[in-house]
Image (cartoon, grey):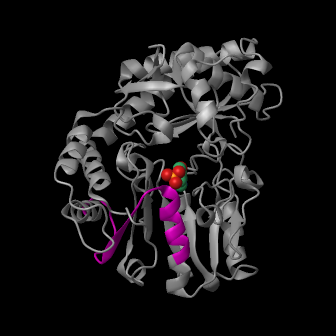
Amino acid sequence: MTHSPLYARDMAALSALQKLRFFPLAVERGEGCYLYEADGRQVLDLSASWGAASLGHGHPALRAAVDQAMATQAGASILSGSNATAVQLAETLLRLTPGTADRRVWLGHSGSDANETVARVVPAVTGRPRIMAFSGAYHGGTQGSMAVSGHTAQAGAVKDGGLTLVPYPDPFRPFEGDKTGAALLHHIETLFQTTCPGAEVACFFMEPIQADGGLIVPPQGFLSKLAQICARYGILTVCDEVKVGLARTGKLHCFQHEDFTPDIIVLGKGLGGGLPISAVIGPARVMDHATAFSMQTLHGNPICAAAALAVLSVIETDALAQSARQVGQYLMDQISALAIDVPEIGEIRGRGLAIGVELVAPETGEPDADLTRKTVFRAWQLGAVFYYVGMKSNVLELTPPLTLTKEQAKTGAAILVQAIKDARSGAVSDAEVQGFAGW
Ligand SMILES: *Cc1c(COP(=O)(O)O)cnc(C)c1O
């Protein structure tokens, strides 16, 4: 297959190590919820680069904030001196995040360095060697964050010696056939009483929606019950909100859909609106454990901190959580309405603008990875960009900019459903998708 000149240059110049490609997308510029390819073609961005471009592309408030921060550049780090923007960001995050009074904020570049920091510091503080997480979890791509992840795409990574993985509560493919999650909670508690003693467990990493594992929404009440069990054993709950946090699910924090407050909260992706910044919010006794424990030179730099402040400010002033709730519901309703004659859709699920569409073989209900990869390819041809997730590579994932309008959602839903129909009737050949391994 011949690619656009820009994509061909990408192949010749950029390392494959950091590519997770589904089709030969080559972007020249972006504006709002649209990307423009090198030939000028406009495509609707229903991924927002995995949720990172939370305000869409080139948002005026973000541009102004970054421009202002550059014009008055207050150093480039917080390691050996403070800067006003980083302090203000930390104060803002503390104000916006429920929890106890005495907390601190750690600023990083990515979800990976944030989760890695948590995985290092909590065992160090508590003296407990074990860590719990869910199979299917994606907590990052660095050694230390992969070590506490459970995604099959990282099967070759060295795991933390104290790591125990348990199944994620998936109502569509439930553990022991129990959609409520009660059987799974019982299983976890049994582990704490036997082979994985609760008193040895430092923390439990959880995604409030398991995104890369398949955009799985846990049964209502599961996470709060799990948090109660953890509390009984003194295990700290770590809520990885990197992809689904910050207004995406219709509330500022995804855990607010459940009646529980995690001990430690991890933010990333959309926090910087496209610039690299992450944050960990947690108890002072953990986050002030030691100085010079987890740092990188540019952590807390005022440019990225200013971007994050602008994102948080626009989320509040434009009521983007409410908008995500409404537009997301509308998007799911549109897909359902158009998909009545598409039995390949096993389930449409999500909260707000974090939506998963699971594709299966209608006769058996088994995951259909081939149809899925051809669907995302076809959707790109038809003018919409989104990717797929899931341990079986069969869940279309929509995480568009929070600024998506209903009109755009309507167009997106139509393209998505048309793409499934086209893909199932052979519009995309094996040869076309060959070379796009996805994951
Ligand atoms: C993307 C992601 C990460 C890792 O973030 P990076 O910015 O890629 O390092 C961690 N946790 C979750 C839930 C994610 O979706």
Q: State the image quarter where residue 400 is shown.
A: top left
Please say if 265 is above or below 290: above
Span shown in magenta: 95-120
Identify which residue is drawn at 54% across, 16% down.
415
Q: Nearer the viewer, residue 327 or 439?
A: 439
The stretch drawn in magenta includes residue 215: no
Q: Nearer the viewer, residue 396 or 225?
A: 396
Q: Is residue 74 left or right of residue 400?
A: left
Left or right of 429 on screen, residue 184: left
Q: Position of residue 233 (x, y in %)?
A: 57, 82
Q: Nearer the viewer, residue 419 or 6?
A: 6
Q: Quadrant of residue 288?
A: bottom left
Horizontal and vertical percent position of residue 52:
43, 42
Quadrant that contains the N terminus: top right
Q: Quadrant where the C terminus lies?
A: top right
Q: Residue at x 39, y 29 (%)?
A: 327
Circle count: 0
Up/down of 193 relative to 267, above or below? below
Give the residue furthest to the bottom: 127
Residue 129, image x and y in percent? 63, 82
Q: Residue at x 64, y 48 (%)?
A: 213
